[in-house]
Amino acid sequence: MESLKDKNYVITGGSSGLGLSVAQSLVARGARVALAARREDVVASAATGLGELAIPIVMDVTDKASVDAGFDRASEELGGLDGIVTCAGLTFAYRIEVLPEERLRHIIDVNLIGTVFCCQAAIPRLRERGGGRIVTISSASARHREEFPHMAIYGAVKAAVEKFSLELRDEVKGDGIAVTCVSPGAFGTPIMANFEKEPTAEAYDAWCRDKGPNSDGMADPKLFGETVAHCLSYPPGLAVDFMEVRPNVPTPKR
Ligand SMILES: NC(=O)c1ccc[n+]([C@@H]2O[C@H](COP(=O)([O-])OP(=O)(O)OC[C@H]3O[C@@H](n4cnc5c(N)ncnc54)[C@H](OP(=O)(O)O)[C@@H]3O)[C@@H](O)[C@H]2O)c1
């Protein structure tokens, strides 16, 4: 496996949850990381917590100008780019019939369009270095029925991220750029902090009734970063195309 020491990565959503876990695993291997997220105070404090190998970048992945400016700054401050990990993402739990238009657009904007904008910004910079790696993030909600319910659009959008990643793989392979899509199961991150109370309670009832007994439980987000570090460490000429990482813990029956 290749060493990640002195390599440079942008991690979107790097201020929290799975993105922060990826940042911790990369910094532990001696890589430099730019953490990109919207909330300046949160991303600054996450970068400070990681030490001198991490810098904060304020970026909204739904805004192309913000993404381009963020990648400019990250490449300049890090000294070039060897890879990106697109962890910025969110979801809400609503039945399709009552999903507000604003939520619908937000889920698509951040998870899909944001991933595309970041890959567009990264490709020329990786090509400049003679290649690199792109890791995109799907979700077990794209393919498993026992995941938390009432997230149909999120699951559909993550399925689109998977297809996008496969197509991107073919487009950039000639430039020495490898694309991996990682699909996490449930990890205990703040992702549910923005969920609205009422539709979430409805989803939780449905989950306990129909799906909960088959759930795999919830994994510690600290474990996730190692899986992405593993994907980034493959020798040139080899790549993990798709990896699904789900909790493997006993779950009490409800
Ligand atoms: N946790 C799970 O169980 C799970 C399971 C499957 C897949 N995933 C996926 O894993 C990824 C990370 O989720 P997480 O659980 O780590 O969530 P999280 O703890 O809520 O972190 C989300 C991150 O994305 C950033 N973000 C949100 N909107 C953004 C925007 N418009 N522009 C830039 N950054 C933005 C957030 O920072 P700001 O709010 O400051 O921008 C934060 O850093 C997501 O793609 C999620 O869909 C998570």
Image: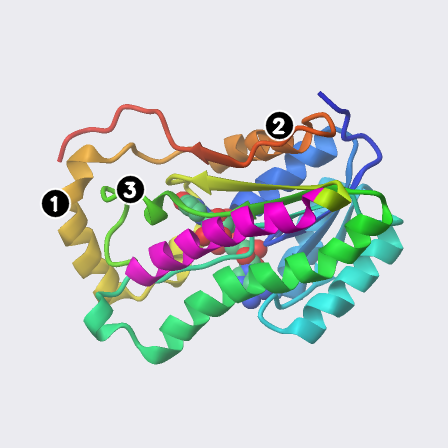
Q: Farthest residue in the bottom direction?
A: 101
Kindly identify which residue carries mark 1.
210
Q: Is residue 7 located in the magenta-colored stretch of the structure?
A: no
Kindly identify which residue carries mark 2.
230
| Mark whose residue sits in front, 3 or 1 | 3
Q: Along the polypeptide, which appears first: circle 3 or circle 1?
A: 3
177 relative position to 158: left or right: right
Q: Callout 1, which amino acid?
A: Asp
Query: Which residues fall within the magenta stretch?
Result: 152-173
Mark 3 Cα shell of 10 Å, populated few (<14), some (14-19), many (≥20): few
* The label number, if any, that marks residue 182 in the structure image: none
Q: Callout 3, which amino acid?
A: His
Asked if labels 1 and 3 touch by Cβ distance under 8 angstroms, the answer is no
Tag 3 secondary structure: loop
Residue drawn 31% across and 66% down? 196
Q: Callout 2, which amino acid?
A: His
Q: Nearer the viewer, residue 116 or 200?
A: 116
Whether 17 is drawn above or below 63: the answer is: above
Kindly identify which residue carries mark 3.
144
124 relative position to 199: left or right: right
> Residue 195, position in %: x, y?
34, 62
Mark 2 Cα shell of 10 Å, populated few (<14), some (14-19), many (≥20): some
